[in-house]
Image (cartoon, helix red, strand yellow):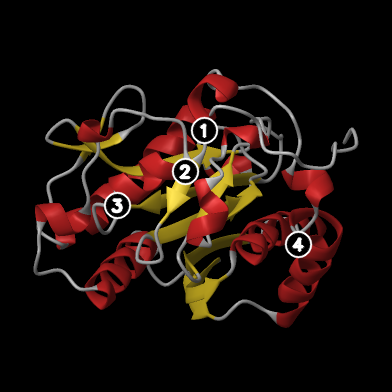
Amino acid sequence: MWYVFEVETWDAYMNMALDSALVIYARKNPGFKAIRFFRFEGPGAITLERYQDYREVSPECEKLGVCYVRRPTGGRGLYHHPTDLAYSVVAPRSEFKDHLASIYTINRWVVNALKELDIEAKHNKSQSILVNGRKIAASAQNNTKNPLLQHGSVFYEPTWRRASLILPPIEYNKFTSIKEQNPDVSLDDVSSAFFESFKKDKSENSVHSTIPEEIKSIAVRLVEKRYGTEKWNNKEGVSRGNCAGIWGTYRERPEPEKII
């Protein structure tokens, strides 16, 4: 049985903690499968990949009130606008034929949802979801054996200018958004289309609900011990570019302790 959790809005720390809490819950309850939809509070947030150097975040972040948090997955840093719709999928890896099949299946749910919004998207060989060759969604998956966690974000508005102020420059002309492709689509339209698409091929084997209090309690503890701490978020890791060259100088922050 799949649990499909309705759209909720949380801050960046709680959003990442909830994804990890779902993983912890799934390990204690073999066979647990869930899909969660969510958005980010306030002016949005940046999620850094697990090993990314935190100093790649621009000092402009603080001025704009945009916080950052480290994900438990790979990929690269991503700015989440408050209107973007994010999702996470937690399930046993045995639910899918193999690693590529899991990415393909989840991406197919995204593509089908966009089709309901009259947006023709497709996923290419690198598993990116594109509209006319431009990326409309981003996702990342954990590399642990079990359970699988894949989370992603679908871009609702063209917010590339803000993103370019706070993350290392990328070619934003290679990105697009739902509003660019179909200006008549509302936030509620997006939520409804994705909710229906993600549960469609699961027939009667899905339950619509809110996140159980047990999982929320685990998440609150994870915010306190991990996702809300400098020790987790301010790690110096693998740089995606010359940070000092991009931002001039690194910001002065307490040296993070080594995390195993």
Q: Give percent across and percent down for residue 202.
A: 40, 62
Residue in view at x 86 percent, y 58 percent: 225
> Which mark is nearer the camera, 1 or 2?
2
The one nearer the camera, 177 or 212, is 177
Q: Give percent across and percent down for residue 37.
A: 46, 66
Label 1 vs label 2: CA separation? 13 Å
Q: Which mark is residue 166?
A: 2
Amino acid, disc 4: Tyr
> Which mark is nearer the camera, 1 or 4?
1
Residue in view at x 65 percent, y 31 percent: 250
Label 1 vs label 4: CA separation? 26 Å
Q: Is residue 89 visible?
A: no
Amino acid, disc 2: Ile
Q: Give percent across and percent down for residue 108.
A: 31, 45
Amino acid, disc 3: Thr
Label 4 vs label 2: CA separation? 34 Å
In this rendering, is residue 258 above or below 139?
Answer: above
Label 3 vs label 2: CA separation? 12 Å
Q: Are marks 1 and 4 in contact (CB under 8 Å)?
A: no
Pointer 2 local density, CA inside 10 Å: few below 14, some 14–19, many at least 20: many
Residue 170 appears left or right of 69: left
Q: Which mark is residue 25?
A: 4
The one nearer the camera, 101 or 52, is 52
**Quarter occupied by the N terminus:** bottom right
> Which mark is nearer the camera, 4 or 2?
2
Return the residue at label 3.
159
Q: Are marks 3 and 1 in contact (CB under 8 Å)?
A: no
Give the quadrant of residue 236.
top right
Q: Secondary structure at mark 2?
A: helix
